[in-house]
Amino acid sequence: MAGVGSGGEEGTSMFPGRGGADGTAAIIPLPVTADDRAACAATDVLRRVGEKWSVLVLALLAQRAYGFNELDRTIHGLSRRMLTRTLRLLERDGLVRRTAAVQQWQGSEYGLTDLGRSLLPLVIALGEWAVDHDTDIRRAHASFDASTATDAPVEAGGVVGAGTTGGRGIPIA
């Protein structure tokens, strides 16, 4: 069986030349180096879909093409500067195509590329998973928060258990 993220080839992995001890593909080689993270194709994509506005913009553009001002009016709370940045990054990644209008006063139109459309089902699946497991995640949050609240008091610097025994040293917001 091929490794996760392998592109389907037997014995390949996201990290070429770093297979598992048994000769199979390694999903994540140990130790994970900074070079590994920089070379990993998944890192940039996951970073992009993890951004606050990217998935929303992709979802809107999956419905139809939008002009910049239309997007600006459609997404409340998103500044024009951040919309510009998000669209440029998505365009740079090849997920969005910007088409300049014939007349300058008409502005530009943004739509998904085939590459962007191919990513959308995966992002939707992740969103569906999150909705399906929301109760489980909230329950885990509550359990974790309750266990860390009894481990150690909040100390100076906003860190639970910093410098104490039994604390987990987890920064709190």
Image (cartoon, rainbow, N blue to C red):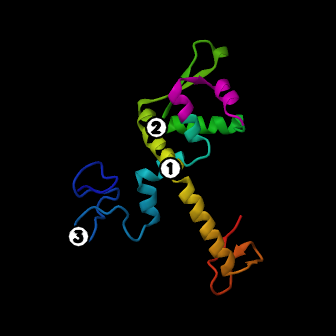
Q: Quick one: 77 or 111, which is closer to the camera?
A: 77
Label 3 sits on what residue type? Asp
Nearest-to-viewer mark from 3 and 2: 2
Q: In this view, does 4 lie to the left or right of 78?
A: left
At x 70%, y 28%, the residue is 73
Q: Where is residue 137 in the image (x, y as percent from the top left)?
A: 56, 59
Residue 24, visible in the rendered structure: yes
Question: How many residues crowd mark 1 within 10 Å: few (<14), some (14–19), many (20+)?
Answer: few
Work out how far the residue at label 3 is from the one at label 1, CA to CA, in angstroms: 35 Å
Q: Which residue is labeled 2 in the image?
A: 120
* Magenta-drawn segment: 59-76
Q: Where is residue 52 in the image (x, y as percent from the top left)?
A: 62, 46
- Which one is earlier in the sequence, the residue at label 3 or at label 1? 3
Q: Position of residue 86 (x, y in %)?
A: 60, 39
Question: Is residue 152 rendered magenta in the image?
Answer: no
- Which one is earlier in the sequence, the residue at label 2 or at label 1? 2
Q: Is residue 106 left or right of residue 92?
A: right
At x 75%, y 78%, the residue is 155
At x 62%, y 39%, the residue is 85
- Which one is earlier in the sequence, the residue at label 3 or at label 2? 3
Q: Which residue is labeled 1 in the image?
A: 132
Nearest-to-viewer mark from 3 and 1: 1
Work out how far the residue at label 3 is from the one at label 2, CA to CA, in angstroms: 35 Å
Q: Quick one: 35 or 43, which is closer to the camera?
A: 43
Q: Regarding mark 1 in the picture, which secondary structure is present there? A: helix
Q: Which residue is labeled 3 in the image?
A: 22
Residue 47, visible in the rendered structure: no
Work out how far the residue at label 2 is from the one at label 1, CA to CA, in angstroms: 18 Å
In the displayed structure, 118 sits above or below 63; it is: below
